[in-house]
């Protein structure tokens, strides 16, 4: 496990002979919290309940010593972060850390704090609805991007991500997977590029769902689908291994610059310096009025009426035929965001993969792009 990315002490190695060691600062923080941890706290009852049932199948978590350490770590975190709310599921995250560093409480607590502050930032704030909405929206839009067939099937059954995926994003899968599989997922997370941290859970969740898509597509009832996704009654070791193997391809196909909007259907590519690079692999769909398209446009862009896509007047096969190894992503842009959403929704419902939308002022985009990427007609 790499601790280095969370350390501000760049002149000090967190390793000793290849084994992570707690620093003097870590030990001092833990020592300062040991007495307050013993005092009574309003969360004691909840923590006592959580420690009894957290990952009890694991041999370490069966012991009273580890259960007590789990409560101490969580209570210390609550005391040190009074601005945060304790949510059930955080105990599963702590258990995954404790079982890696069972003999070093100060290191365990230090890593736990760094891990949550890095990968779960905003999740435990008292007003976390926008954070949850953003994380769930990104996951759902990535599913529409990579597997519109499965996305459409779930949408038709009114299955929404908050019904099953909340624990996925809240705990980075620590609450739904055995610890051995959690560590595999977290290893991949820790070894991923820093710019991928925000999208990792969403993309891994998509890969996981794609692995069980044949089962999901056969389920025709709302309750059956939600129950299956909540319990994942399959062999989890091969499921995680196959999902991690697929994750590399998902990263390649998903631009780092992707963001999400809770109201959108697909991921968004925002205005920025990386836009010129990403346009090279995008088939741009321009839904502005034809007169404006003819006057000035991104080179290679296709002009269609967004309402024609929704009504079926423009057959999506026209766009499919223009995709190739170089043009992998369909990027929709226009002046009216509602029309862009109509177009992207129509393309996804037509089961076209890799649909995204460009979110930016058109004139800003033209100003940003190199001259050779712009076509002007007099």
Image (cartoon, rainbow, N blue to C red):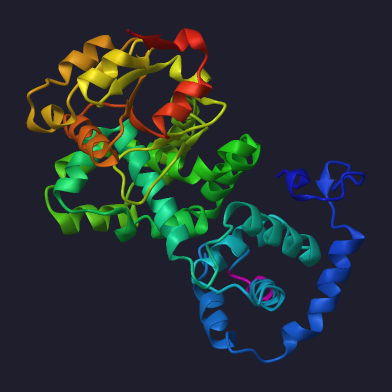
Q: Residue at x 51, y 53 (%)?
A: 172
**Whole-percent x and y of residue 255?**
48, 29
Residue at left 55%, top 26%? 274
302 versus 109 height, above or below: above
Q: Quick check: 240 left or right of 19?
A: left
Residue interval drawn in magenta = 62-69
Q: In front: 239, or 339?
A: 339
Q: Residue at x 74, y 44 (%)?
A: 5
Identify the main secondary structure in magenta: helix
Coordinates of residue 355 in the picture (x, y in percent): 31, 29
Among the 4 quarters of the image, the one containing residue 329: top left
Determine whether, in the image, residue 283 is placed left or right of residue 288: right
In the image, residue 113 lies in the stretch drawn in magenta: no
Decide which of 19, 337 is in the foreground and name it.
Answer: 337
> Which quadrant: the N terminus?
top right
Residue 310 percent coordinates (x, y): 13, 33
């Amino acid at each position: 496990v790499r601790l280095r990315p969370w350390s501000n002490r760049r002149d000090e190695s967190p390793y000793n002979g290849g084994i992570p060691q707690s620093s003097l600062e870590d030990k001092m923080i833990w020592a300062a919290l040991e007495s307050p941890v013993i005092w009574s706290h309003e969360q004691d009852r909840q923590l006592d309940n959580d420690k009894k049932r957290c990952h009890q199948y694991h041999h370490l978590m069966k012991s009273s010593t580890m259960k007590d350490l789990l409560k101490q770590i969580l209570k210390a975190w609550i005391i040190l972060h009074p601005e945060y709310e304790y949510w059930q599921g955080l105990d599963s995250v702590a258990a995954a850390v404790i079982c890696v560093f069972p003999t070093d409480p100060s290191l365990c607590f230090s890593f736990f704090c760094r891990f949550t502050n890095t990968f779960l930032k905003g999740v435990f704030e008292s007003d976390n609805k926008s954070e949850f909405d953003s994380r769930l929206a990104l996951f759902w839009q990535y599913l529409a991007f990579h597997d519109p067939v499965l996305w459409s099937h779930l949408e038709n059954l009114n299955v929404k991500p908050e019904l099953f995926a909340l624990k996925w994003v809240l705990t980075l899968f620590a609450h739904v997977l055995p610890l051995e599989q959690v560590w595999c997922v977290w290893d991949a997370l820790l070894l991923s590029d820093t710019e991928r941290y925000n999208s990792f859970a969403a993309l891994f969740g998509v890969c996981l769902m794609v692995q069980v898509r044949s089962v999901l597509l056969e389920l025709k009832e709302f309750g059956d689908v939600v129950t299956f996704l909540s319990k994942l009654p399959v062999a989890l070791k091969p499921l995680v291994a196959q999902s991690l193997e697929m994750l590399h391809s998902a990263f390649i196909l998903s631009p780092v610059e992707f963001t999400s909007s809770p109201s959108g259907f697909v991921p968004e590519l925002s205005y920025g310096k990386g836009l010129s690079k990403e346009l090279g692999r995008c088939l741009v769909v321009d839904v502005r009025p034809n007169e404006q398209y003819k006057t000035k446009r991104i080179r290679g862009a296709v002009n269609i009426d967004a309402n024609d896509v929704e009504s079926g007047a423009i057959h999506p096969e026209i766009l499919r035929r223009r995709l190739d190894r170089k043009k992998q992503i369909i990027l929709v842009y226009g002046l009216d965001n509602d029309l862009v959403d109509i177009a992207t929704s129509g393309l996804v419902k037509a089961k076209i993969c890799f649909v995204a939308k460009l979110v930016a002022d058109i004139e800003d985009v033209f100003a940003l792009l190199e001259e050779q990427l712009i076509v002007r007609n007099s």
